[in-house]
Amino acid sequence: MALYHHSPTSYLPGGYTFRGATLSDLASIVYLLNQRQLTETAFRADGFRQEWQSRRCNPALDVRLVFDPREVLVGYLQFWMDDNHPMLWGCVHPAFEGRGIGSALLRWGEARARLALDQFPVSLWTAPHFSTLPVQRAHELCEHLGWQQIRPQKAEIKKVTGALHLPETADLQYHVYEKAIEQLN
């Protein structure tokens, strides 16, 4: 199966770049996430660094970043598998919403989830989840791309959102969406 039917970068404005992540991107990612965070608990680079250095994560393959023409990080999406369950988590800088950045990231995430699912028997496939901050633009984008909002149990929200870098006591304010496997790229 081809990874993309068409390149997700076709959604980006001219001059924007789209690439995988490296450890040197952590400070920019944490800054972006903390700009969007709705709680007092801040994201920290240490949590990302520890996860990214584990065997479960390869930031060059599992993370996508979008930079504006000035090379400022404006979008982030991370993919991982929780057993055989594909998970996506990310955001776009509020000043850059509505420019195709979220579409590019989410389309890439769908293709990445489908690629990962192809490694399992069809009988084990589960619908991917995407979580993001509860902002109207993200909700509109998800609806437009065929994602349906779900309501996970409070005890599951940390796992479902992928906010693995926040303390257990953090008051998570996220929306979670699910997409039917048949609708993936």
Image (cartoon, grey):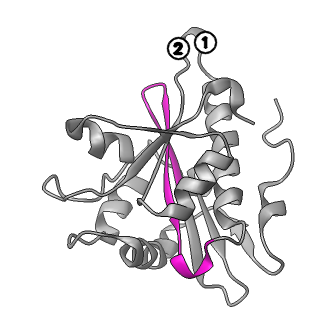
Secondary element at image label 2: helix
Q: Residue at x 68, y 90 (%)?
A: 70
Residue 117 image offset from top left, x and y in percent: 61, 26
| Count of labels in the image | 2
Residue 10 image offset from top left, x and y in percent: 84, 61
Residue 152 picture quarter: top left
Q: Is residue 58 left or right of residue 119?
A: left
**Direction top: furthest residue:** 123
Secondary element at image label 1: loop
Q: Where residue 67 is drawn, which disc sits there? A: none
Q: Residue at x 71, y 67 (%)?
A: 18
User: On screen, 154 above or below 51?
Assistant: above
Residue 24 image offset from top left, x and y in percent: 50, 75
Is residue 64 on the magenta stretch?
no
Q: Give the range drawn in magenta.
A: 78-97
Q: Is residue 41 left or right of residue 34?
A: left
Is residue 93 on the magenta stretch?
yes
Q: Mark 2 points at which residue?
A: 124
Q: Can residue 118 be seen in the rendering of this structure?
A: no
Q: Name the residue under label 1.
A: 121
Cα separation, mark 1 vs mark 2, equals 6 Å
| SS assignment for the magenta stretch, majority | strand
Quadrant housing the C terminus: top right
Mark 2 neighbour class, 10 Å CA radius: few under 14, some 14 to 19, many 20 or more: few
Q: What residue type is labelled 1?
A: Pro
Residue 49 image offset from top left, x and y in percent: 37, 63
Asked if the residue under mark 2 is in contact with the one under mark 1, i.e. CB atoms within 8 Å, the reply is yes
Q: Which amino acid does label 2 sit on?
A: Leu
Q: Is residue 69 left or right of residue 120?
A: right
Quadrant housing the N terminus: top right
